[in-house]
């Protein structure tokens, strides 16, 4: 059997704490698709910039570092890794100092353009029949042509509760402020709380994890039937 020409794309946007990463990976696993976590690239770039003692707020210096940013990521749902050069940074990019630097790096237009091209190349190279791509501005900038575009959202209270449960080393107040700060910073760069035309909203405020997966897959199946 010959290789398909291009994989089907499912684009999932959403704010911090909406569950988009874990839900997207589970959906990809269930459908036999690959899974592309775009946020990992911004985190990896922030890690790389810090490792080179570059100020993340120094936009020209960050842009100058882009040609040497040798990034790779595992897109099989069960073989996930993040690597820069020869260094695996899957865990390191989740460290607090990296998290604190991500927004400064992500708001640089040249960075977003560079990584958007990278995401498209990675997705197009998938050997599977489909790829679930998740992150910010995925439905409008990275993959606006995706067959299925979803905004996965939840109330601020629900998102804070989920993020707090994930991060047991910090107080609920600290986690809440970090989430609000991330929302404020990201809202300066992308619109992530309201769906663009053609994007279907899935509100997981009152859904548990499995129900959210089912809701997303229902949207995907319905949309694919419409396009068939």
Image: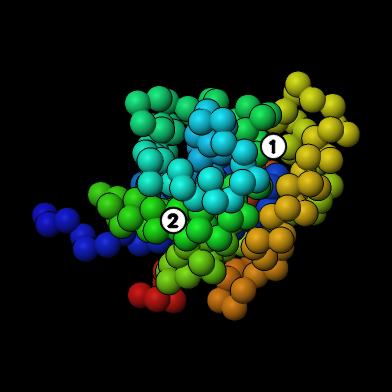
Specify the quadrant of the image occupied by residue 57. Answer: top right
Q: Position of residue 68 (x, y in %)?
A: 38, 41
Q: Position of residue 20 (x, y in %)?
A: 60, 48
Apparent side of residue 20 relative to residue 179 in the rendered image (left or right): left
Q: Read off the residue under disc 2.
A: 114
As helix, strand or loop, the secondary structure at mark 1 comes to helix
Give the camera-side residue of 150 and 176: 176
What residue is drawn where x is 46% and y is 47%?
Answer: 64
Q: Residue furthest left?
A: 1
Mark 2 vs mark 1: which is more N-terminal? 1
> Where 55 sits versus 196, above or below?
above
Res. 215 mark: none
Specify the quadrant of the image occupied by residue 216. Answer: bottom right
Give the camera-side residue of 132 and 89: 89
Q: Read off the residue under disc 1.
A: 100
Is residue 213 visible in the rendered image? The answer is no
Q: Position of residue 8 (x, y in %)?
A: 35, 62
Is residue 6 visible in the rendered image? The answer is yes
Give the camera-side residue of 207 and 133: 133
Specify the quadrant of the image occupied by residue 140. Answer: bottom right
What residue is drawn where x is 77% and y is 54%?
Answer: 184
Give the camera-side residue of 127 and 227: 127
* Disc 2: CA contacts within 10 A as few (<14), some (14-19) or many (>=20): few
* Disc 1: CA contacts within 10 A as few (<14), some (14-19) or many (>=20): some
Marks counted in the figure total 2
Which part of the image, by quadrant, shows the C terminus? bottom left
What residue is drawn where x is 79% and y is 46%?
Answer: 181
What residue is drawn where x is 56% and y is 76%?
Answer: 198
Q: Position of residue 15 (x, y in %)?
A: 68, 53
As helix, strand or loop, the secondary structure at mark 2 comes to helix
């Amino acid at each position: 059997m010959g290789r398909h020409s291009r994989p089907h794309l499912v684009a999932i946007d959403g704010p911090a704490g909406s569950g988009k990463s874990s839900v997207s990976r589970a959906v990809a696993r269930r459908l036999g698709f690959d899974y592309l976590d775009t946020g990992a690239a911004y985190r990896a770039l922030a890690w790389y910039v810090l490792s080179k003692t570059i100020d993340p707020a120094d936009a020209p210096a960050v842009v100058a570092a882009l040609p040497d940013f040798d990034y790779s990521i595992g897109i099989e749902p069960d073989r996930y890794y993040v690597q820069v050069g020869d260094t695996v940074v899957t865990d390191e990019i989740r460290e607090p100092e990296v998290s604190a630097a991500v927004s400064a790096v992500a708001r640089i237009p040249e960075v977003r353009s560079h990584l958007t091209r990278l995401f498209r190349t990675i997705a197009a190279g998938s050997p599977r029949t489909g790829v679930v791509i998740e992150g910010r501005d995925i439905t409008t900038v990275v993959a606006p042509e995706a067959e299925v575009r979803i905004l996965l959202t939840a109330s601020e209270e629900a998102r804070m509760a989920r993020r707090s449960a994930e991060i047991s080393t910090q107080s609920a107040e600290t986690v809440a402020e970090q989430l609000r700060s991330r929302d404020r910073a990201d809202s300066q760069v992308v619109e992530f709380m309201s769906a663009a035309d053609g994007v279907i909203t899935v509100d997981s405020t009152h859904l548990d994890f499995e129900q959210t997966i089912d809701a997303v897959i229902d949207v995907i199946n319905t949309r694919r039937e419409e396009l068939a």
